[in-house]
Every structure is written in C-alpha cells, then in structure tokens.
Amino acid sequence: MSSSSGKRKEIYKYVAPFPLYSMNWSVRPDKRFRLALGSFVEEYNNKVQIISLDEETSEFSAKSTFDHPYPTTKIMWIPDSKGIFPDLLATSGDYLRVWRAGDQETRMECVLNNNKNSDFCAPLTSFDWNEVDPNLVGTSSIDTTCTIWGLETGQPLGRVNLVAGHVKTQLIAHDKEVYDIAFSRAGGGRDMFASVGADGSVRMFDLRHLEHSTIIYEDPAHTPLLRLAWNKQDANYLATVAMDACEVVILDVRVPCTPVARLSNHRACVNGIAWAPHSSCHICTAGDDHQALIWDIQQMPRPIEDPILAYTAAEGEVNQIQWGPTQPDWIAICYNKSCEILRV
C-alpha cells in the first residue's frame, strides 16, 4: 500500500474543511470513485460532502456540500449496483433523511420520523439499506428499538419529491440502546437482520417471525457492542467489536455464543470493520492506533495471528473504514480531516 510514482497511484488523499466521521462509497457503476463524507463537529451545524476522484488529474474534488443537523452517525448510498434507482443517499442522526444527488446540488427528499407526537427524538445510532430490496431501510436507536422503513421511490413529477417512507415495523430489539443494525444475506437477503447494543448482545431477527429473536453472542463482561458487519460472501459469518476493545470478534451463526476467531493486533480501540466485497475470507479493521489492517481468516477456527497487510495513517486515529462494493481493489479510511483511498 505504499505510494508509487507510476501512472496509477496507490493512495489518493482528500482533505476536507472539517473533521470527518462517516463515509460511504457510491455503488453506481457510472460513479466509480465517488464517496460521501460526513463532518464531526460537536454542534448543531454539520455538513455532508460528496467528493469524486478525477482519474485524469488524480485529484479528489468536492462535487456538492450540504448542511446536516448534528453529525451524521452513518451515511449510505442506495445499494443500486445497476444504476436503475434514483441517485439517492441516506443519513442518520436525529432522524433518517433521504437525499437525491444531482449534478449541481444535493437536495433532501424526505425526513423519516417515527415519533410524530413528541418534540423530542431518540437519536439514531446507525441504519442499513437492504441490498436485495432497496425499498427497505432499517434504523437502530438509543430508545432500544429498531425500525424497518418502507421507501417508495417513484418517478419525479416536476419538483415534487420523489421519495416517501412509511414504518413497516418497529420492535424493541435490546434491553438497552441499540448501536448498529445490518441486514443479512441469508434466506434470500430480504428478511433477516442483526443488531448489537449496550446490553452486550448480538441478536438476529426475521421480519417474517418478529415474535422472537435469536441471541447469537453475548459479551462475557456485558460490555456494549458498538458495530457489526456481515460477511459479504458467506452469510454464516459476522464480525462485531465491543466498546474500547482492541480486538474484533468473528462469529458463526451456526455456532452461537462462541467466537470462531479473534483479531487482536490493534494496539488501541477498534473503530471500524469492513468485509471484502468479493472474498469470504478477507476483512479489514481500523482503530485508534492509526492502523488499518487486512486479515485473511481462512485458517479458522485455528487462531489468526497476524494481518496480511497493514497501513499506518501517521497523522491520526482511523475512525472509519469502508471497502468499496464496486471497487474491491480499494479501501477508504478517514482520520482527522482526511479521507484516503488505498489500493490493496
């Protein structure tokens, strides 16, 4: 992953005008090196910026910048690898918002608020956009619930907004705050999802049978679990990370409650996990030790001792990592005000 002076660089860097937290690769085939970045400023006024790489000049430039209330806890482009849906992205913070990216400007399509009766909202910690059915979005909240939203993405009529949403179901998912949610590719990829939360458990749900859930894992010390990520190629595996933990736990849903691997080379807490889009045995982790590490886990259940690749961001703690679904050769990381994409 070292920089080279050849025709194609190994690292491209963009420095934003604000500290960065959330980030996501665009999925559309016609927008190859496009990312959305969210600011992290501890006040009401925050920003989202869409950047893209000019492959001729090898420079990133900002295509659009728009205001966002509070920092975005997550940003996601619509998982539309064929480019048949409108060019949408969503953000979570106080509410779930859906935006439409245009050539000149990005405008908000809708705000999805499940609590119309109150002046107070329970902030959203994360969300996931279903890859099989892009009209399904699931959100997780500090109020212990997950909400599954149905989106209607029709054809625009003049300036009339294109996207509307309704609550399909809301469920109490955990005993405490829910910190992350992710749809699984199992069983058709539409109905199964998992969540993690402050109670230290990973729970799995099926939209067809919401009367019960399955506990896949519980942290032995009941430490809150902050993130989870499903393997993109093998729906049996998922990864999770506990608060302030220096290791990532790999789980196999066929063997509940017993980790099949622990990836523990980070020297400070882990902030992000991303599975390879194209391989079932590669996963990337990033943390406060300035490192992004890529692991090959095919030796499981034998211990995975060391990563196969390591990259150090000299200037800061890596707080976000994303492996591009249409760009399997590139990983994106954020630290301080910088976003870098690294060829792997």
Image (tube, rainbow, N blue to C red):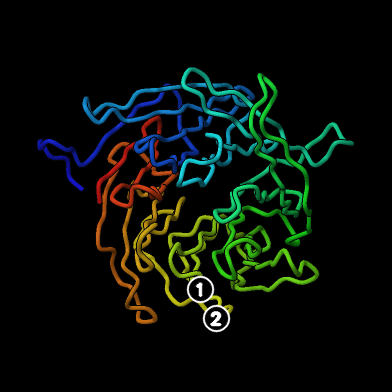
Which SS class for mark 2?
A: loop
Q: Is residue 126 above or below residue 254?
A: above
Residue 52 image-quadrant placement: top left
Residue 65, position in %: x, y?
49, 21
> Do the residues under discs 2 and 1 have CB atoms within 8 angstroms?
yes
Pointer 2: what residue?
254
Q: CA distance from mark 2 to mark 1?
A: 7 Å
Q: Is residue 32 above or below residue 170?
A: above
Rendered view: 221 above or below 276? below
Q: Residue at horizontal 64%, vertical 65%?
A: 192
Element type at mark 1: loop
**Residue 278 location, quadrant:** bottom left
Which sits in the foreground, 337 or 325?
Answer: 325
Q: Nearer the viewer, residue 54 or 230?
A: 54
Mark 2 is surrounded, within 10 Å at the Cα level, by few (under 14), some (14 to 19) or many (20 or more) other residues, namely few
Q: Amino acid at mark 1?
A: Asn
Q: Residue at x 33, y 73 (%)?
A: 304
Residue at the spot of label 1: 236
Q: Residue at x 37, y 43 (%)?
A: 333
Measured as percent of width and height from the top left, residue 337 is found at: 40, 30
